[in-house]
Amino acid sequence: MSMSNRLVLVWSVIVCIGFNAFAQTELSISKQYPQYWEVDGQPTMLLGGSIEDNLFQITALESHLDLLASVGGNYLRNTMSSRDEGNQWPFYLDQSTGLYDLDRWNNTYWLLLEKFLLETSSRGIVIQLEIWATFDFYRDNWDQNPYNPKNNSNYDSVRVDLPTSIPTHPIYTDNPFFWSVPQQRNNMRLLWYQQLYVDKILSYTLKYGNVLYCIDNETSVTADWGRFWSDYVRKKASENGKSVYVTEMWDPHNLDHISHRETFDHPEIYDFVEISQNNHQLGQQHWDNGMNQIARLKNRGQLRPVNNVKTYGNDKGRHGHGSKNGMESFIRSVFFGSAAVRFHRPDSGLGLSDEAQSVIKSMRALVDRMDFFEAVPDNSLLGQRKPNEAYCRAIPGKQYAICFTDGGGVGLDLSSFDNNFQIEWLDVMNSSWSSVTKFEGDQVIPPGQGLYVALIKSRN
């Protein structure tokens, strides 16, 4: 028996035992707080970061998941991507011809996915799974992709109307792969192989309750594509007696771009909203954009979870946002009402670096220390506030969490409440709390520069 076959056999036994031995994580939209997710019946803030996007393909998976869980993390992104060196592709490769067979599977790929699902579920970690890894289908990545007609034995470029070379960026939508659905080119041959792949994914993921579904990564194609696959995933889940939650991720960085309305304005198609591209915005603009979109959902009676699966910002990164803004963006997203927030992989984001761990751990400590889901974001409660100086989330008269980005000071007038208040400080980068003291006066001034959160509570 080959090493690959032995791996298949051993892990199949582990999966069969493990699936029954471990408690399953069950995810749903909170009935009491529909802006947030509920895990095992409890409203839960999803916080995370990871070293890679296609995490199911990495080595040392368990230790990475343990590290995330140790700092209070419970949220990951997983693209079904295979473009990195050493990654597995989902299809069988005929070594004699060097061609993939799209009718046959690479068992190692699917066992990696099964293991990932089991290991995350057993740790209470929620996965946001992206079905179509957009960048796998363009430029150099398309040259090695099994769906490329030159790389498989199932069709040629004429039969499925797919080019063998696509030198452009995905924003130009030059790959007809994403135009196969009936509402567009109705490319039945290609669509059949796409369906086989999605069916195979669902045959694994529908066994687990910790999976959110995102159709694409930073897509610019027609809305018909996302609608088709969202509807298909929902139907397949229903046929299996399961409920699923689906969204789409659009490319434009401005949330006011009309493409984002496809998710914001259509709760019948998309169960939650993904706004990661807002994390290209900086400072106060980042906050204002997030707040405005959540307000629009409320005003239209369409409030549902808003996720941020990619928080950009790393001093070594190419986006130019910097590590400090990345950490601020993560915290702002938590404060303005995102249901899920994750640091993007290095070097576009901080991943699960020491800095990321500190922020995740601190935000988990804050959520657990206050009535977080009852509180609402409201900077108008702060006097003498400068843009991007401080952000407030509060239950007026009872609790106030105020995050300072880098020193400063704001006013907080509590004189109209017949209560005594106490204050304690969370040093975000050290994940440590100060002692509790009586809050007096009407000024809130952090103990130093850098990221600090004041937690002010009524003693009554």
Image (cartoon, rainbow, N blue to C red):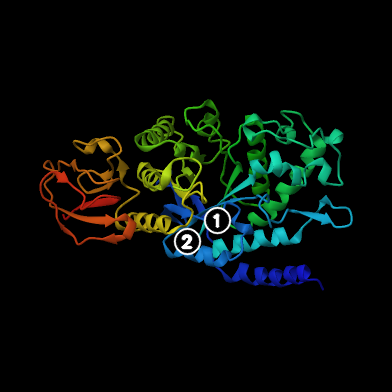
Q: Which residue is mark 2?
A: 68
Q: Residue furthest front?
A: 316
Q: Quadrant of residue 289?
A: top left
Give me the residue at 84% from left, 36% from top: 157
Residue 450: mark: none
Q: Nearer the viewer, residue 344 or 256?
A: 344
Q: Closer to the observer: label 1 or label 2?
A: 2
Q: Image height check: is 199 above or below 434?
A: above
Q: Answer yes or no: is residue 315 visible.
A: yes
Q: Nearer the viewer, residue 90 or 126?
A: 90
Q: Image height check: is 67 above or below 383?
A: below
For disc 2, the neighbor class at 10 Å (few under 14, some 14 to 19, many from 20) is: many
Please state if 333 lies on the left or on the right of 54 as rendered. Answer: left
Give me the residue at 64% from left, 34% from top: 169
Measured from the top left, where is residue 270 in percent x and y? 56, 38
Measured from the top left, where is residue 286 in percent x and y? 39, 36
Labels 1 and 2: the sequence-earlier one: 2
Q: Answer yes or no: is residue 227 visible.
A: no
Would you say the residues marked 1 and 2 are in contact, meaning their CB atoms lie under 8 Å apart?
Answer: no
Q: Nearer the viewer, residue 247 or 1?
A: 1
Measured from the top left, where is residue 50 in percent x and y? 51, 55
**Quarter of the figure that contains the C terminus:** bottom left
Q: Secondary structure at mark 1?
A: loop
Q: Which residue is mark 1?
A: 210
Q: Secondary structure at mark 2?
A: helix
**Quarter of the figure that contains the N terminus:** bottom right
Amino acid identity at mark 2: Leu
Q: Nearer the viewer, residue 108 or 117?
A: 108
Give me the residue at 59% from left, 46% from top: 213
Amino acid identity at mark 1: Asn
Task: Give the Cα distance between marks 1 and 2.
Answer: 16 Å
